[in-house]
Amino acid sequence: MPGVAMIQLTTIIASILAAILYRMGGSGNYPRQARMVGVPLVTTLATLVMGVHSWSLILYMGLMVGAISTYWDFLFNDEDNFYLHGFMIGIAALPLMMAGVHWYAIIARSFILALFMGIWCKVWKWDIAEETGRGFSIVATIPLLLI
């Protein structure tokens, strides 16, 4: 397990990178894959650097690609649901249980992501702030998986 300073540095750098990629994918100026593949890739690499070493990271990344690609509007009368979006991004970490990550850490992070993304998007009505905040939070909450 890396030291606290390494985890903090990785969290900050990877969170900023994820925020940028999440926004790029939603801006219309870059391919959507910047978000759909870039953010899961950065998140998975950050999780690896923070000490989770397992082939289950591949499953985690795959599930995150799926979760990050929808706002679940098809379930909510064509309204984006950022609460469910955040929750499902968190739930994508379930395969990490095979690497020793505790289920309660995954569930806690899922609820935190759900609440953060839902409330964040209610407060901010500016796409740049909304998207960078959501992208940042995905990586910023990874240390919760280490508890």
Image (spheres, rainbow, N blue to C red):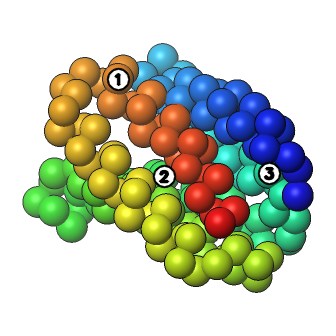
Residue at screen point 30% across, 24% down? 127
The kind of secondary structure element at disc 2 is helix
10 Å neighbourhood of mark 2: few (<14), some, or many (≥20)?
A: many
Q: Which label lies toward us, 2 or 3?
A: 3
Q: Amino acid at mark 1?
A: Ala
The kind of secondary structure element at disc 3 is loop
Task: Say which mark, if any, is on residue 129.
Answer: 1
Which of pointers 3 and 1 lies earlier in the amino acid sequence?
A: 3
Residue at screen point 78% across, 44% down? 4
Above or below 36: residue 130 = above
The kind of secondary structure element at disc 1 is helix
Give the CA distance from mark 2 to mark 3. Answer: 22 Å
Quarter of the figure that contains the N terminus: bottom right
Give the CA distance from mark 3 to mark 1. Answer: 27 Å
Relative to 41, 85 lies left or right:
left
**Image quadrant of residue 123?**
top left
Say whether residue 53 is visible: yes
Residue placed under numbered mark 3 in the picture? 50
10 Å neighbourhood of mark 3: few (<14), some, or many (≥20)?
A: many
Q: Amino acid at mark 3?
A: Met
- Residue 122 % position (x, y): 17, 38
10 Å neighbourhood of mark 1: few (<14), some, or many (≥20)?
A: some
Task: Say which mark, if any, is on residue 5.
Answer: none
Give the CA distance from mark 2 to mark 1. Answer: 17 Å
- Residue 71 % position (x, y): 32, 53
Residue placed under numbered mark 2 in the picture? 68
**113 and 42: which one is in front?**
113
Above or below 30: residue 60 = below
Say whether residue 41 is visible: no
Q: Amino acid at mark 2?
A: Ile
